[in-house]
Image (cartoon, grey):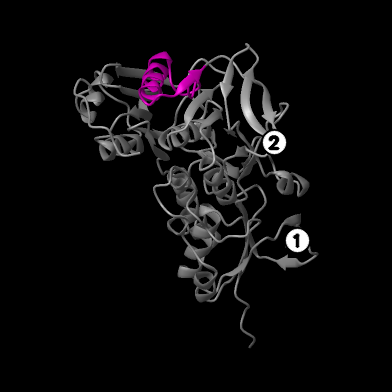
Amino acid sequence: MVAESPTRFVIVGNGVAGTTAAEHIRKNSPGAEITLVAGEPYPLYNRVALPIFLKGRVPEKNVMMRTIDIHQQRNIDLRLETWVTGLCLDERTVVTAEGQELPFDRLLIATGGTPRVLDAPGAYLHGVYQFQTLDDTKALVQRCEESRSAVALGGSYIGYELAEAFSHRGLQTSWIMRGDRFLRRLLDHDGGQVVDALARDRGVEVVYNDWVSSIDSDNGVPKSVTTREGHTCPADMVGYGIGLRYYTELAEQAGLEVRKSIITDEHLQTAVPDVYAAGDVAEFHDVTLDANNQVGTWDNGASHGRLVAQNMLGKSLTFTEVPTYVTTMFGSRLSVLGLTPESHPELEREVQVNLTTRKYRALFFYRGRLVGAVIIGILKGRRKLEECIKGRQPIEGDRRALFDLLGSIEEPEPALEE
C-alpha cells in the first residue's frame, strides 16, 4: 500500500499572517510540504518596530524576527524575491514570474498591500519617501541624518509615525493632512484637539485642510513643500503615507470575490474550497457585526495566521479576536481596540476628554454592545475592555460607567519615552 503524500501548502506573502500560518502548520503537521513565497528580499521582520528603528531607538538587527536558517530548520521552503503572476485554481498551482509552477492542496493568500503613490510635482525627487518596508525605513534613516527639516504628509497612521519620528530626531517638522484632524474617520473633534496639542507640545507645525501642491527642489533634492493654499514648509526631506492598495489582482484573475480586499467567511476561507486569505488583504465575515470587516494591523495579521493554519489543517474555527493597535503618540500613547467608525461609521460613541491632561477616551457600541474603543493616554483596564467586547452582551444601565475601568481622566501622566 502506497502512503499518501503529505498535504502541500502554498502561502503567498511572508508577512506576519503568512509566516505565522506557515509555522503553525508545521507545528501541527510535521510531514506537510510548506512553500512560503515572498516578494521582498527579507524573511519576516517586525513592521511595528519600523517607527522605533526610524527614530534611532533600536538597531536594524532588532527589527528582524526570522532568518533563512530558521526557515530551513523548520523545513519551510522560503522563496524570497519571488513574485507570483498567476493562480490556477482548477489545476491547483501557483505560477511565479520565473515560470515555476508550485502545486498546492491548500492555498493561503496573505499578500498585504502596497502604498499609494503621491501624485504631485517633485514626488520622485531623491529625498521623498514612502514608509512601508524595511528598505524604505533604511533610506529614511540615512536621509534624516543629512537633514535639518522634514515634512510628513498624510492624516493617518503612517503620516503620524513619520511626523513623530522626524520630531524625535530633532528636525524642524511640518505635518500636512487633507482633513481637519488626525484620523478624521476615527477620532471626533475632541480627539483631534488632543492629538493637535500633543503634536504642538513637541514643536510640530500641523497644517490642516490642505495638501501638497508641489515639492520644490534645489539641485535635484527637496528644499520645501508648497501647499494648495499657498503655505510653504521647509523640507530637506519628505515622507508620506496616503493609504494602501491591496494586492488583489491575483485573486481577481483567478475569479475569487474581491471588493476592497478578498472576501472570506468567518473561517478565513474564500468561496473556493481550500483557498484562504488572511491579514490586510482579507475582508472576513465578522461575527461581532454579522457583516464583513477588514483590519490592517499587525496584531490582527498574527491572529489571522494562527487561526487560518488550524482551518487549513481541517478545523473550522471562527475568528473572534479583538484587533488591537498600540503606538506611542508624541510622548503619550494611542490604543485602538476592536471595531471603530473608521470602517463602520454607524457605530455609536461615548466620549471622555480632558485637553489639559491630554487624555481622550471613546467607546464604540453596536446594537447596545461594546465593540471597540480608542484611548489617548496610558491604557488601563485593557483586559476588562477586551473581555466585555468578546462577551457580546448588551450593556445594562449607564454605559458611561465603563470609563471607570480606565482610571481618572483628570490626573496627568508622565511622558512616555518615544
Q: On the rendered image, what quadrant is the N terminus found in?
A: bottom right
Which stretch is magenta? 182-207
Q: Which residue is mark 1?
A: 96
Q: Position of residue 81 (x, y in %)?
A: 67, 60
Mark 1 / mark 2, whichever is N-terminal: 1
Taking the spot 43% from the left edge, 38% from the top edge, the residue there is: 169
Residue displayed at 40% across by 24% down: 203
The residue where tag 2 is placed is: 125
**Residue 3, image quadrant:** bottom right
The answer to whether 207 appears left or right of 260 in the picture is left
Image coordinates for residue 87, horizontal then vertical, percent: 75, 56
Foreground mark, 1 or 2? 2
**Residue 76 drawn above or below residue 37:** below
Q: Is residue 411 visible?
A: yes
Q: How many marks?
A: 2
Q: Nearer the viewer, residue 87 or 234?
A: 234
* Helix, strand or loop status at disc 2: loop
Amino acid type of the residue tagged 2 in the rendering: Leu
